[in-house]
Image (cartoon, rainbow, N blue to C red):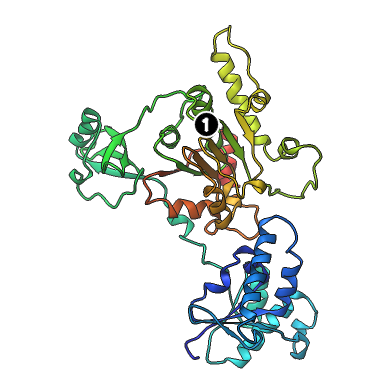
Amino acid sequence: MENKKFFVLDTNVLLHDAQSIFKFEDNFVVIPLIVIEELDTFKKGEGELARNSRQVSRYLDELRIKGDISKGIPLERGGILKVDVENHKDFNLDFLKEATPDNKIIGVAYKEKLNNTESDVILVSKDTNLRIKANVLSITAQDYESDKVVEFDSMYKGILVHHVEGSIIDLLYRNKEVDPTLILDLPKIYPNQYLVLKNNGGTSQRGIARFDGKRNKLVPLIDSNKVVWGIKPKNLEQTIAFDLLLNDDIKLVTLVGHAGTGKTLCSLAAGLQKSLDEQLYKKLIVSRPIIPMGKDLGYLPGDVNEKMSPWLKPIFDNIEFLISGHNNSSSEDSPTMKGSDLIAQGMLEVEPLTYIRGRSIPNQIMLLDECQNLSAHEIKTIITRVGEGTKIILTGDCDQIDNPYLDSVSNGLTYVVEKFKDQVIAGHITLIKGERSELAEIASNIL
C-alpha cells in the first residue's frame, strides 16, 4: 500500500481518453460518483466526447460485474479501480460548501488524502482552474499526460544543419547520393530528415540532402526550383516542404508552423498538381476540425458543403488564389477554372471529419488543416481511414490551439510528428519564416 498512489480522475480526463482508467499502472484509480453523472450528460450524439462517454460507461459496467466497484475492482496491470462518493459538506471547509461538481471531485480527493497519509494522492484533470483549487487544499494536481510525447521545444523539426568537407557536398550533387557513414560526427538522423550541409572550410558552399531511409543514402532534393501551380518556394523550409509534398513515396507529410508560413498554400498547390495535372490521385480531399475561435455560430443551414463553407473559407481563399494564378499562366484557349467547378467535377471534395469514421479512402490525396485542434485518438481515427495509394497531409500551428483540452504537446499533430519520425513513408518539416506579409510576420513574433 505504501508504494501505491491514488489517482482521482476528473470527468474531462475520461472524455479525453476513454482508456485512461487503465493507464495508471498498478496504482489506485478513483472515480468520483459525480463524474459518472457528468459522463451521462455527454453520452448522446456522434462526436468524440459522446463516443468516449459511452465507452467509459461500458468499461465500468464490465468491471462492476466482477465485484463491488465502490470498494475496488482489480485491473489487469495490478491496479485497483473504485467509484467513490463523498459529501463535500461533511468537511469543515468554507471552500467546499458550494455544491458544484468541481467541489465534489475535490472532496473525494481531499478524503483520500486524509485517509491515506502514507501514499501520494493526485487529482488528475485537464481543467487548469480545478488543479489550482486542489492545490489550495495542498492536494497534488496534475494534467493528464499519457498522450504527451515530448516537450514542445524539443519536438522533431525535420531538419538538421551539419558542417562537412566540401568534397562531401560535391559528391552529393555529382553522384546524386552520399553514404552518411562518410560524414564525421553525424548525429542520429531519421528517414526523410533533411540535412543542410555547410562547408566547414568557411566558404558559402552548402548542399541540401534528404536521408532516404529505404536506401540508407543522402540524396539531393527532387527539384528545388520547381514552380507548383504558380507557387515558387520563398525559403529553405518551403523548398523542403515541396520536396516532401511532391515525393510519391512519402505517404504522410506533416507541416508545422505559425500563421503565414505557407503550410496550407503549399499543400494545396501540391495537391492540385498531383490530382489535376499529373492525375496520380482521383481527387483532392480537404477538411479541418470544426472548432470555433470565439463565440460559436450555432447551427448552419444548407447541405454539407454550405455548412462547411465558413470553416473552410481559408482553404477556398487559397484555392481561388492558386486557380487565378493557374488561369493566368494557361494558354488563351484554356477554359477559365473556378473552385466550384472542381467540386462539381468531383476533383475537389469538402469532407467533414464528423463522418470519416468507418470510411476507406483509396487513391486520393487528403489535406487536413488545423490539426493541432485534434486529439491523438482523433488523428489515429483519420489516418487509419487511408486506403491504398492515398497520401495524407497534416498541417497546423501548435501555438494556436482552440480546443480547451489540448496544448502544444498533447495535441494530435505533435503526437503524429513524434510517433512517425522513424517511419520511411513519413516526412516532416517545421516552417519558420512567415511569408504572408511583413505585418503578419511581425504580429506572429511579437503579439
Q: Is residue 242 left or right of residue 370?
A: left
Q: Residue 313 location, x and y as percent? A: 68, 35
Res. 341 in view: yes
Question: Dot 1, how many residues are within 10 Å of its Cα: few (below 14), some (14-19), or many (20+)?
Answer: many
Q: Is residue 181 left or right of residue 70?
A: left
Q: In the rendered image, which residue does mark 1 sit on?
A: 271
- Please identify the quarter of the rendering in which residue 311 is found: top right
Q: Relative to 361, say whether 149 is above or below.
A: below
Q: Residue at x 69, y 55 (%)?
A: 47
Q: Is residue 106 left or right of residue 147?
A: right
**Secondary element at tag 1:** helix
Q: Residue 22 location, x and y as percent? A: 54, 73
- Please identify the quarter of the rendering in which residue 223 is found: top left
Q: Residue at x 54, y 13 (%)?
A: 330
Res. 9 in view: no
Q: Residue at x 63, y 78 (%)?
A: 135
Q: Relative to 325, say whether 161 is above or below.
A: below
Q: Is residue 247 left or right of residue 220?
A: right
**Observer-nearest of 441 and 115:** 115
Q: Relative to 129, say whether 354 is above or below.
A: above
Q: Residue furthest front?
A: 65
Q: Amino acid at mark 1?
A: Gly
Q: Residue 55 location, x and y as percent? A: 64, 66
Q: Residue at x 52, y 62 (%)?
A: 147
Tell how many labels. Answer: 1
Q: Relative to 283, say whether 189 is above or below.
A: below
